[in-house]
Amino acid sequence: MHKRYQWKLKQREIILGDRTLLMGVLNVTPDSFSDGGKYADPDRAFARAVELEEDGADILDVGAESTRPGSQRVPEAEELRRLIPVLKRLRGKLSIPISVDTYKSGVAEKALEHGAEIVNDPTGILLDLQLPKVAARHDAGLIINHMRGTPETWAKLPPLKDLMRSIMIDLQAAVNRSRQGGAQKHQLVIDPGLGFGKRREQNAEILANLSLLRTFDLPILVAPSRKSFLKKEADVLTEFATAAAVTASILNGAHIVRVHDVKAMKSVTEVADSIKHAEAHEAETKESHVRWQRGQ
């Protein structure tokens, strides 16, 4: 069994560890790698958000700036122009919490004022040190994602040496920056950042060694959905590849998985969770047997 955590947000407390939670992706960008332009209109975005909740999403993650490889940064005003009309439409219409995918403290501030409860920073608190202060002030959840370089430079980066050690050192520094900014431990979730400045083959290594992140004693989020290292020649095959990565994430310690196709991945998480529970039960049974033998 995963360790259980209480993720304390302003309006609610989310229990992590009983089952894997699904974070549904809603991109309101014109250029995201998977669904760019599809939900840029607030009405279409609203309809998609409701659909994701009905499909079984536990959290909705709204992004208004693409972080696909090679993407350019957008000004704060443009990000807000895309994001705020959608948040206004969604306010009070969903029963699940809304997360905003941004590294800008100004965008996070406005999003939290418009009903978001979580900030998902793709940069690991590297580009805006005011972000944890905003999260702390609003009692918001804060997801710290590991990123190396920027989307513009990823293609030129050499492979990370001693991959997991490097990720853990960087994540520890990001957690420290968050705590120094006022964020409390119960607000934090960590993400190893699949695809964010890593070489294709290194993403499999991260999934295989995900359990190392348990040393942080923080909930773990993994976002494998439709990442370029899983890309196949047909969309349906990419979805199968995503399902494999989601399963590996859960079996190796993820509390939350961030996905595009919530309905399909809900079935995947249910099976992976049942395997995880069976594994935990087996471990408990063995431990009881060992204790019984010692007592004889």
Image (cartoon, grey):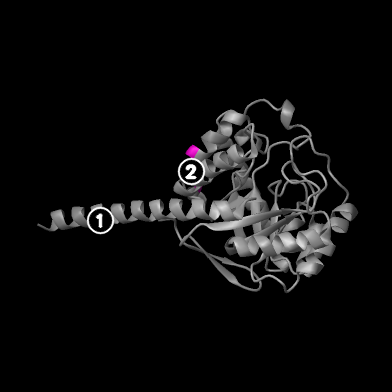
Q: Residue at x 72, y 32 (%)?
A: 154
- Decide: marks 2, 1 in contact (CB < 8 A)? no
> Which residue in the structure is indicated by mark 1?
285
Q: What residue type is labelled 2?
A: Ala
Indicate whether residue 209 is drawn in magenta: yes
User: What amino acid is found at the position of numbered circle 1 in the picture?
Assistant: Thr
Q: Where is residue 116 in the image (x, y as percent from the top left)?
A: 73, 65
Q: Is residue 130 left or right of residue 239?
A: right
Image-based side of 269 in relation to 278, left or right? right
| Earlier-in-chain disc, 2 versus 1 | 2
List x then y, in percent, for residue 40. 82, 54
Q: In which quarter of the image is residue 227?
A: top right
Residue 69: percent from left, percent from top: 74, 36
- Which segment did they paint magenta? 208-213
The answer, for residue 151, to whether it is visible in the render is yes
Q: Quick one: 167 or 211, which is closer to the camera?
A: 211
The residue lying at 30 percent from left, 52 percent from top is 283
Q: What element carries label 1?
A: helix
232 and 30: which one is in front? 232
- Where residue 248 is drawn, which disc sits there? 2
Q: What's the distance in space between the residues labelled 2 and 1, CA to CA?
A: 24 Å
Q: Quadrant of residue 39?
A: bottom right
